[in-house]
Image: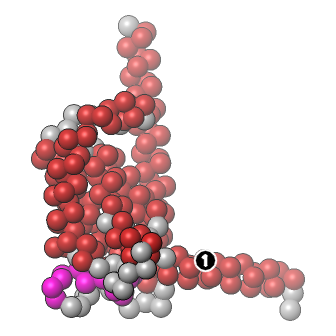
């Protein structure tokens, strides 16, 4: 065996171990990738901070299950479209009340914009539904169409999470590119205004 082969084998085993661990994790920050990308692409139509929160808020459910050692699926009722809809309406109600207090933070990151209850509600529903769709591809305990007790969206692949994690990763990269372009355009507009 050549020295390169041993290094490649160790590298491949490390990558497979990482993928296995990620696939077993009940929650990850990976959902922020699609949240950021879609939120930036639909910036004029949905409320950006609500969409980001909606893309991760249903993972409070597995946190509670793990923290209190509950005899309950990690991805239970709130990872269904019915449960997710209830969370979305609750999130929309909360965000419509606290949205103004987020303005300084949003201004700092150059993502401030006007919002309405309609844009907040659309962001809540779409962010949570996208989360459920992504998780339904890789977690066996999800019943997205509860009360029906099956998951037709579950991937049959050996590592079902790999595709989802790669999609989320590339969405994050895409979001970073779009955000940098956004910052550049804001800088250029401000510079042009100052020159006039």
Compared to residue 50, the image places residue 6 above or below, namely below
Report whether 103 appears left or right of 148: right
178 or 119: nearer the eye? Answer: 119
Residue projecting furthest to the left: 118
Identified at 42% across, 58% down, the residue is 33
Compared to residue 95, the image places residue 190 above or below, namely above
Residue 89 on image: x %, y %: 16, 58
Compared to residue 50, the image places residue 56 above or below, namely below
Compared to residue 133, the image places residue 194 above or below, namely above
Identified at 87% across, 87% down, the residue is 2
Q: Is residue 171 magenta?
A: no
196 or 129: nearer the eye? Answer: 129
Residue 191 on image: x %, y %: 44, 17
Q: Secondary structure at mark 1?
A: helix
Quarter of the image for the N terminus: give it.
Answer: bottom right
Q: Give the colour scheme shown.
A: secondary structure
Identified at 33% across, 84% down, the residue is 72
Instruction: List the residue tagged with mark 1.
Output: 18
118 or 43: nearer the eye? Answer: 118
Residue 153 on image: x %, y %: 28, 84
141 or 175: nearer the eye? Answer: 141
Q: Is residue 159 visible?
A: yes
Place residue 161 in its image quadrant. bottom left
Place residue 73 in its image quadrant. bottom left
Residue 113 on image: x %, y %: 27, 34
Identified at 24% across, 77% down, the residue is 77
Stretch of the chain drawn in magenta: 137-148
Q: Is residue 185 visible?
A: no
Report whether 34 appears left or right of 123: right
Q: Is residue 145 magenta?
A: yes
Place residue 67 in its image quadrant. bottom left
């Amino acid at each position: 065996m050549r020295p390169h082969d041993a290094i490649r084998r160790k590298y491949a085993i490390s990558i497979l171990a990482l993928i296995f661990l990620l696939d077993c994790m009940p929650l990850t920050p990976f959902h922020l990738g699609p949240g950021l990308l879609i939120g930036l692409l639909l910036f004029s139509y949905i409320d950006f901070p609500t969409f980001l929160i909606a893309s991760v808020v249903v993972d409070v459910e597995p946190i509670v299950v793990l923290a209190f050692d509950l005899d309950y699926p990690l991805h239970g009722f709130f990872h269904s479209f019915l449960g997710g809809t209830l969370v979305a309406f609750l999130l929309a109600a909360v965000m419509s009340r606290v949205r103004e207090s987020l303005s300084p933070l949003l201004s700092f990151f150059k993502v401030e914009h006007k919002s309405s209850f309609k844009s907040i509600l659309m962001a809540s529903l779409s962010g949570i539904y996208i989360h459920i769709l992504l998780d339904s591809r890789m977690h066996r305990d999800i019943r997205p169409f509860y009360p029906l007790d099956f998951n037709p969206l579950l991937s049959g692949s050996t590592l079902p999470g790999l595709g989802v994690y790669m999609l989320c990763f590339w969405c994050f990269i895409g979001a970073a590119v779009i955000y940098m372009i956004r910052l550049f355009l804001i800088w250029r507009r401000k510079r042009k205004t100052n020159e006039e």
